[in-house]
Every structure is written in structure tokens, then in C-alpha cells.
Image: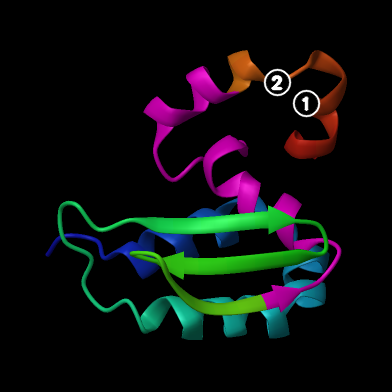
Amino acid sequence: MPKTLIDALKDGIHSNLTDPEKQELDPVIKQFEDLMRQVGEAKEGDVVVLDMHTPQVKILFNDKTLGELSHPDLTPALLKIWLGKKPAQESLKRPCWDCLEPTRLGALHG
């Protein structure tokens, strides 16, 4: 069975956070997952936007706002889905790392 969008995002978050980070972020991650469940099954051409302005994260699906979440550590946790040690999709990691300044890598890679 193919992995759903919410499954991929959950795996990406949980694979890249330490146990203390998971514990700290658990309530806001559950809120994030609840908002993403509203998407249901994403189809080709659907667009999910995570507008990240620490500490706010605005979630949009096909230009419709699903909600906003606030936690100072949420944006770095979400970035780890793609830029962490175990990215949800390895092919996205290399191009993204090339865009970042070396001084910021430590903050994202934790």
C-alpha cells in the first residue's frame, strides 16, 4: 500500500527528532497531523504549503488555509522532514543543502 502524505510527514518528523524533542513538540505535532488529515488523499497537482515564520507555521492546501500553529521549535522540526539525517525523500536533501549557508547547517541538522 502506498504511503500517504500524512504518513510520510509523520515518518519524516519522528525519524529526525530526539526523544526529548518529540516530547516537547508532541502537542503541536498532533495538531499539525490533525490539520494535515483534512487534506485526505493528495492527488497529482495538489499543492501543500507550509508557510514557516518562526514561531508561526501556516498550513495551506490548494490555496486554502487549513490552520496556523505556533511553537518556537516547530519550524526547525518540520525542516528536518527534508533536511534532517533521515529525510522523507533523500533526493530532495542534496539540492536543499546546496542552497543553505554553511553557518546555518548546524542549526537545521541538530
How much space separates mark 2 and mark 1, taking CA atoms?
Answer: 7 Å
- Which mark is on residue 105? 1
Query: In the rendered view, does 25 fall on the left or right side of 7?
Result: right
Task: Report crowding for label 2: few under 14, some 14 to 19, many 20 or more residues within 10 A (C-alpha).
Answer: few
How is this picture coloured? rainbow
91 vs 60: above or below = above
Q: Residue 51 is drawn in which quadrant?
A: bottom right
Contact between labelled residues 1 and 2, with CB atoms less than 8 Å apart: yes
Residue sticking out furthest to the front: 63
Q: Residue 97 is drawn in which quadrant?
A: top right
Q: What range of the chain is rendered magenta?
A: 69-96
106 vs 86: above or below = above
Residue 76: in magenta span: yes
Q: Which residue is mark 2?
A: 100
Give percent across and percent down for residue 42. 23, 65
Q: Quadrant of the C terminus?
A: top right
Query: In the rendered view, does 12 fall on the left or right side of 8?
Result: right
Residue at the spot 45% in from the left edge and 60% down from the top edge: 9
The secondary structure that dominates the magenta segment is helix
Tell me the amino acid under the disc marked 1.
Answer: Leu
Give percent across and percent down for residue 32. 57, 76
- The residue closer to the viewer here, 24 or 73, is 73
Query: In the rendered view, does 53 fall on the left or right side of 7?
Result: right
